[in-house]
Image (spheres, rainbow, N blue to C red):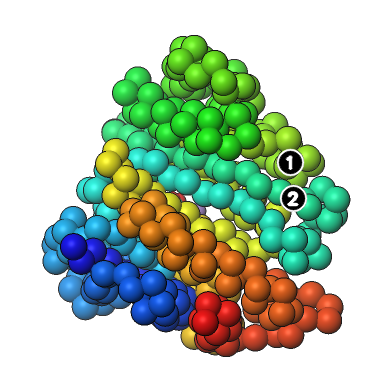
């Protein structure tokens, strides 16, 4: 049966990088005879410009109907002064919560060819392979009440609510424990249980769940220490599991260990394995339109999509091998440039991956 893939280019560098990922997907489609069809829709700022809202009904309907979704990035200075409720980012958050994509996998893997591109010493990052499991549809991102209110003294006060229910903690815990079981057998749960009650409960549930996973070694770390340990000795980690906001921050830090945020893909999965796939980075307004963005995080996200949502492991492996081959050839976009390497544009990088696939 034909699988339907929805491509949401978004804003800024989004259209530039998804175009390269689509080229790569068309190539594996032909090579492996995949029964897949592609469709596109608007989300974020581009949807605001066309329809006045960041997540038009048509886009949400298409996303619901698709077997998998590949998203570029949303947002940019053009829309930054809009009301929170209709900002581009709300389009992305609406997709995540609308489709219940609570399980966000952000693998930070250092390609050996990029050891010199990391800002950390090669011996600190060489062989790095960690997986951050981020809860994506709860926590302070979605907690109620939220807003800005006026106090009795006339002063305004902004407020958000950090909440997690037991069931939300359990379902992300399951994703993390299962992942750790299939990898190195180590899970570090990151919280702020020395200050925040919500994460005291988080820690309790993780400890309880650990009894069902005797093969997984569970540890706990406060988020401030975790940020420090990620740049001090990142290889101590195998799988990390954390809430929405801590995961957002820690995954950007982890990205830099791999050489560039332009290398970090992600999968956002629901309970049944349906997913949305996107690079961890944003719309990079500072370089948008220049044709210099690194498309590899998006291309690697497409590989994750083939593996997790379409069970096309061979095609996924082929894309990852092609990326490695292109790096072997010394081709580098600006963000991962190092001495003796050849600087290429976004399009040239996409073309090189396609050529390496052939
Ligand atoms: P950003 O990730 O867009 O950019 C941070 C820095 O990394 C910039 O210097 C940028 O040039 C660089 N960078 C990012 N991706 C790159 C790539 N593929 N190749 C080379 N360099 C790359 O983060 P920001 O500047 O904080 O946010 C910009 C906009 O993106 C905001 O509107 C933000 O809300 C949005 N955003 C969207 C997503 C998403 O759609 N998933 C994620 C993060 C930020
Ligand atoms: C990410 C982004 C988003 C987030 C924003 C754009 C809503 O930073 O995917 O990491 O905070 O989750
Ligand atoms: Mn982020």
* Image point (27%, 70%), residue name: 36
- Residue 231 in the image, given as x and y percentages of width and height: 75, 45
> Which quadrant, please, contains the N terminus?
bottom left
| Residue 94, image x, y percentages | 27, 52
Q: Nearer the viewer, residue 258 or 137?
A: 258
Q: Which residue is mark 2?
A: 127
Kind of element beneath mark 1: helix
Q: Is residue 20 above or below residue 254?
A: below
Residue 101 can be seen, yes or no: no
Q: Position of residue 164 (x, y in %)?
A: 37, 26
Please tell me which residue is depicted at 16% across the width and 59% down the height of the picture.
65
Q: Position of residue 265 (x, y in %)?
A: 51, 58
Question: Mark 2: which secondary structure?
Answer: loop
- Residue 216 in view: yes
Q: Which residue is mark 1?
A: 235
Mark 1 crowdedness (10 Å alpha carbons): few <14, some 14-19, many ≥20? some
Name the N-terminal-most of marks 2 and 1.
2
């Amino acid at each position: 049966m034909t699988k339907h893939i929805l491509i949401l280019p978004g804003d800024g560098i989004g259209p530039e990088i998804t175009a390269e990922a689509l080229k790569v997907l068309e190539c594996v489609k032909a090579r492996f005879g995949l029964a897949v069809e592609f469709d596109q829709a608007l989300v974020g700022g581009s949807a605001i410009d066309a329809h006045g809202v960041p997540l038009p009904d048509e886009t949400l309907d298409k996303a619901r109907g698709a077997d998998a979704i590949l998203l570029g990035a949303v947002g940019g200075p053009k829309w930054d002064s809009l009301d929170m409720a209709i900002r581009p980012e709300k389009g992305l958050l609406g997709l995540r919560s609308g489709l219940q994509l609570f399980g966000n996998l952000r693998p930070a893997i250092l390609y050996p060819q990029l050891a010199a591109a990391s800002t950390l010493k090669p011996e600190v990052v060489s062989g790095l392979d960690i997986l951050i499991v981020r809860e994506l549809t709860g926590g302070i991102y979605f907690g109620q009440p939220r807003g800005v209110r006026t106090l009795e003294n006339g002063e305004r006060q902004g407020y958000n609510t950090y909440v997690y229910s037991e069931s939300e903690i359990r379902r992300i815990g399951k994703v993390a424990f299962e992942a750790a079981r299939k990898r190195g057998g180590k899970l570090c749960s990151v919280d702020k249980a020395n200050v925040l009650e919500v994460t005291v409960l988080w820690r309790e549930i993780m400890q309880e769940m650990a009894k069902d996973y005797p093969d997984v070694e569970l540890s706990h770390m406060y988020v401030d220490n975790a940020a420090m340990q990620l740049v001090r000795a990142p290889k101590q980690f195998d799988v990390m599991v954390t809430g929405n906001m801590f995961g957002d921050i820690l995954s950007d830090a982890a990205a830099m260990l791999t050489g560039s945020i332009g290398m970090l893909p992600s999968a956002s999965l629901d309970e049944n394995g349906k997913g949305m796939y996107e690079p961890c980075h944003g719309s990079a307004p500072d370089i948008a339109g220049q044709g210099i963005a690194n498309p590899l995080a998006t291309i690697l996200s497409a590989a994750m999509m083939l593996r997790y949502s379409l069970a096309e492991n061979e095609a996924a492996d082929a894309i990852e091998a092609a990326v490695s081959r292109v790096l072997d050839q010394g081709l580098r976009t600006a963000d991962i440039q190092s001495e003796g390497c050849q600087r290429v544009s976004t399009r040239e990088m996409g073309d090189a991956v396609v050529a390496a696939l052939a």
